[in-house]
Image (spheres, rainbow, N blue to C red):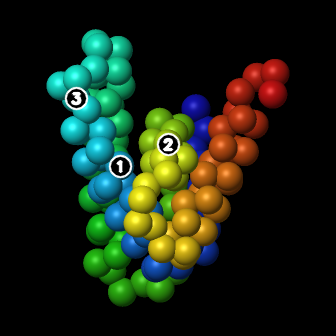
Amino acid sequence: MKTIKFTKVDRDEVAVLQAELMYYAQIERLGLHHWGIDDFLNAIVAVDTAHRLWLSLRKKLESDSKIFKLQFTATEAVIVCKCCFWLRDGRTEYQKFVAEKYRNNIDEILKSLTPGQ
């Protein structure tokens, strides 16, 4: 499957995505004990993927770079997209902007990968 790439991503956007993934994984974990088996298994995949992405973005932020290249597998892109679609209370205007930007871009890319779209 194709990878989804973003170039020239600034440090602030990476930091926002990292924080949003942490919040998303936390909210997914809260529901683990209340869902049926399908939702439970989907949440396990989402939490695991979000955590791996959070660590990956953390490593990028620990570098001295100001601009980054982000590359996601289709599964990772879906988790970032789900995270950005989630309407989390308490987002700043900038966090809302970043979430909307990546949600829209990933959504468009994923739809282009789907036959018949």
Taking the spot 68% from the left edge, 53% from the top edge, the residue there is 105
Query: On the rendered image, what quadrant is the N terminus found in?
Result: top right
Would you call the spot at circle 3 few (<14 residues within 10 Å), some (14-19), or many (20 or more)? some
Residue furthest to the top in view is: 37
Q: Which of the two discs, 3 and 2, sits closer to the camera? A: 3
In space, the residues marked 3 and 2 are separated at their CA atoms by 17 Å
Query: On the rendered image, what quadrant is the C terminus found in?
Result: top right
In space, the residues marked 3 and 1 are separated at their CA atoms by 13 Å
Q: Considering depth in this image, is 23 or 76 the residue closer to the camera?
A: 23
Q: In the picture provided, is 103 more to the left or to the right than 11?
A: right
* Residue 80 seen in the figure: no
Image mark for residue 50: none
Taking the spot 35% from the left edge, 64% from the top edge, the residue there is 19
Image mark for residue 82: 2
> Do the numbered discs 3 and 2 sit on residues whose CB atoms are within 8 Å?
no
Say which residue label 3 marks.
Answer: 32
> Do the numbered discs 3 and 1 sit on residues whose CB atoms are within 8 Å?
no
Say which residue label 1 marks.
Answer: 24
Three-letter amino acid code at the position of disc 1: Tyr
Q: Considering depth in this image, is 66 or 101 the residue closer to the camera?
A: 101
N-terminal-most mark, 1 or 2: 1
Q: Position of residue 16 (x, y in %)?
A: 43, 69
Taking the spot 43% from the left edge, 84% from the top edge, the residue there is 65
Q: Position of residue 40 (x, y in %)?
A: 28, 22
SS at mark 1 in the image: helix
Would you call the spot at circle 2 few (<14 residues within 10 Å), some (14-19), or many (20 or more)? some
N-terminal-most mark, 3 or 2: 3
Three-letter amino acid code at the position of disc 3: Leu
